[in-house]
Image (spheres, grey):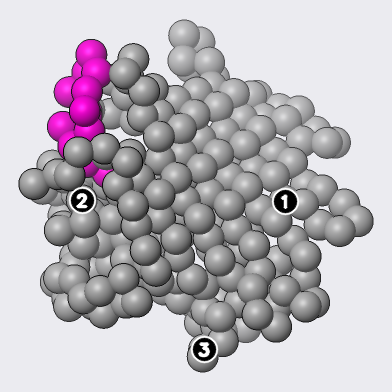
Amino acid sequence: MTSLVMRHFLPLALLATAFLLSHTTAVNAEQSLKAYKAHYRVSKGTFAIGSANITLTLSDDGRYQYRAYTTPVGLAAVFRKDEITELSDGHIENNRIIPDHYLYNHKKPKKQRKVSLDFDWENQRVANKTADSHWSMEIPVGTQDKFSQQLSLMLSLCRGESSATFQVADGGLLKTYQYTQVEEESIRTEAGEYQTLKLARNKDNKPSKATLWFAPNLNYLPVKIAKHEKDGDYVMELISVKWEGPASN
């Protein structure tokens, strides 16, 4: 169960993401991005079952690295020893996120699942590699990986947009993720109380199973993410965040 939860939550949670005003580079995106380290707790009902640490680093030449590391905690850690790492590397041009490489690595006590994507923007293709399969497909400009879409969503909110749609390379297919603002809401987490923008997420025009709350005062960092699964409802909440660059206004 914990393995399933982390696998589904990570890409979202992995929404965990926040970004603005960084010290700078040759592009203008740094005006709305800032490096950070954030810690989240994943719960099912009243039980904490997972811990996610998410890091965004930015370089002076306009590159980014976005990394999430998730492990089970509490009783879940007694039964599962899984570790999940998700990583997106890429660059920022004209205030847009352009992924170059994506890695998903799920370590279990007796086996490991590893997926990598390499984007070839000159030929507009993406290559996927797993232990037992290799494939390549054509992609349109603006395509994201499962993790980089979170950075793109943050930038959309920074621009004042109330909705966003992304084409995402996932499992040999292009999937459409849609985010739509529902309302504004005050949310309290262990990190504090924040006024937030509440968004619903749909995938391939299916009914929403995920709701996300972003705090403008935290550079649109997601402070809470809720997801409905067949075996119950899961929530990820912000515990702490540390900004790595100058504070944004």
Q: Give the magenta-colored segment's residue range.
A: 19-32
Q: Front-most of 96 and 186?
A: 186
Q: In front of the other: label 2 or label 3? A: 2
Q: Main secondary structure of the magenta part?
A: loop
Q: Return the residue at label 3.
A: 45
**Image-based side of 92 in relation to 131, left or right:** left
Q: Return the residue at label 1.
A: 106
Q: Return the residue at label 2.
A: 219
* CB under 8 Å between discs 2 and 1: no
Q: Residue furthest top?
A: 122
- Label 1 or label 3, whichever comes before in sequence order: 3
Category of crowding for the residue at label 1, using alpha-carbon neighbours closer than 10 angstroms: few (below 14), some (14–19), many (at least 20) = some
Q: Front-most of 57 and 172?
A: 57
How far apart are the two marked residues, 2 and 1, measured between alpha carbons? 30 Å
Residue 146 appears in the picture as rendered: no
How far apart are the two marked residues, 2 and 3, measured between alpha carbons? 28 Å
Tag 1: residue type?
Answer: His
Residue 107 appears in the picture as rendered: yes
Tag 2: residue type?
Answer: Asn
| Residue 232 position (above or below residue 25) | below
Category of crowding for the residue at label 2, using alpha-carbon neighbours closer than 10 angstroms: few (below 14), some (14–19), many (at least 20) = many
Residue 76 in percent (x, y) is at: 70, 78
- Quarter holding residue 70: bottom right
Residue 245 in percent (x, y) is at: 26, 37
Q: In front of the other: label 2 or label 1? A: 2
21 in magenta: yes
Residue 111 in percent (x, y) is at: 87, 52
